[in-house]
Amino acid sequence: MMMRRRPVGLERSRPASQPAEAIGVSRYAGLRARLLHRAVLVLVPVLALMMYISWTQYASAKDAVRRGVLDLVGELARQQARQGDLVDPRLPEGSRISLIDGTGVVRLRNPDPEHWVGRSVRGTPLARLVDSRTPAVFDAPGLDGTPRIHAVVPVLWSGDAGARLLVSIPVDSAYASLERLLATSVGSFGLLALLVAAAWQWLDRQILSPLLELGTVVQQIANGARSLRAHPQREDEIGGLASTFNRMLHGLVASQKALIESERRRVLALEGAGLGRWDRTTDTNQG
């Protein structure tokens, strides 16, 4: 029975149906998609919570402003009953204090640059005051057309139980603190978005892209391109991994070459000694 021996070598892997570059990019894209998905799962609830907290603070601050204005009107009503004047230095600039009788006619107004004293508020955005009998706070254009927050309380004036004391504060002044709160919240959201974008860029540049390059080299080497090497350009864990991979590959290639050379010499030695053919039935004791 004849047997032939052939040099032993490492067989090359069969080429994949998909290019190594495509495989690496596909895996890289999948990794990016998974990381992005997890980031969204974390960030969306955080942003929603921040928006809820901001909106709650905004609503609470707005209610506090409206309650404060209504309390101020109550104090003015008591002051007017005692002293008969309509002045309060705590009001912001541009505020108006008005006394409106039960028929809707303005009896007192301080200041009154538009000369509304003696005129009716019917046909204006403040016409609702004519039928109001309870303290109220609402937003509407003032008698001068300026957007204002109005607070009204019933008062007794010259025997008229239907009179009302009205304080009108410009919206810009009344809600100045709310505007600052809103601007702070928007700025916080913007800063968070910038931090997330910067973190993603850092992750992509420092981790994902190097892993893509290393993975592409590994795939190409697995497909038979044994001359390729990773190019570590950094001194961190990924750079150390690339260097270790290169050393391992050098050792494998050197072992493969040594094994092939050893097999080649053994075959040459056998052929030179006339022992290239083996016969298992040969009896070496027979002459």
Image (spheres, grey):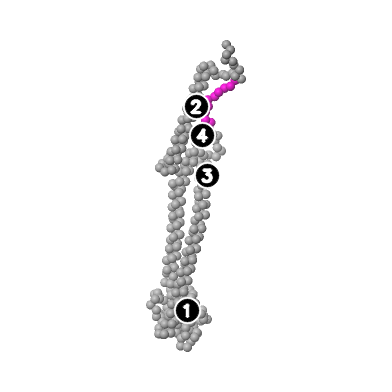
Cα distance in 3D space between marks 3 and 2: 36 Å
Give the alpha-carbon distance from disc 1 to disc 3, as whole Å.
Answer: 68 Å
The answer to whether mark 4 and mark 1 are in CB contact below 8 A is no
Secondary structure under the numbered disc 2 in the rendered image: helix
The residue lying at 46 percent from left, 74 percent from top is: 67
Foreground disc of the pair 1, 3: 1
Is residue 109 visible in this depiction of the protein? no
The mark nearer the N terminus, 4 or 1, is 1
Asked if labels 2 and 3 touch by Cβ distance under 8 angstroms, the answer is: no
Q: Element at badge 4?
A: loop
Q: Earlier in the sequence, mark 4 or mark 3?
A: 3
Mark earlier in primary sequence (1, 3): 3
- Label 4 and label 3: CA atoms lie apart by 20 Å
Viewer-side label of 2, 4: 2
Mark 4 and mark 2 in contact (Cβ < 8 Å)?
no
What separation in Å lies between label 4 and label 1 (alpha carbons)?
87 Å
- Tell me which segment is drawn in magenta: 2-12
Residue under label 4: 224
Q: Quick check: marks 4 and 3 in contact, CB under 8 Å?
A: no
Residue type beneath disc 1? Val
> Which residue is denoted by mark 2 in the rendering?
260
Res. 26 mark: 3
Report which residue position mark 1 lands on: 152
For the residues labelled 2 and 4, the Cα–Cα distance comes to 17 Å
Mark 1 Cα shell of 10 Å, populated few (<14), some (14-19), many (≥20): many
Three-letter amino acid code at the position of disc 3? Ser
Query: Nearest the camera: 159 or 274?
Result: 274
Question: Residue 169 appears at what percent x and percent y?
Answer: 43, 75
Query: Where does residue 224 sit, x and y in percent of width and height?
Result: 51, 34
Dot 4 crowding, Cα within 10 Å, few <14, some 14–19, many 20+? some
Residue at figure coordinates x 59%, y 18% from the top left? 279
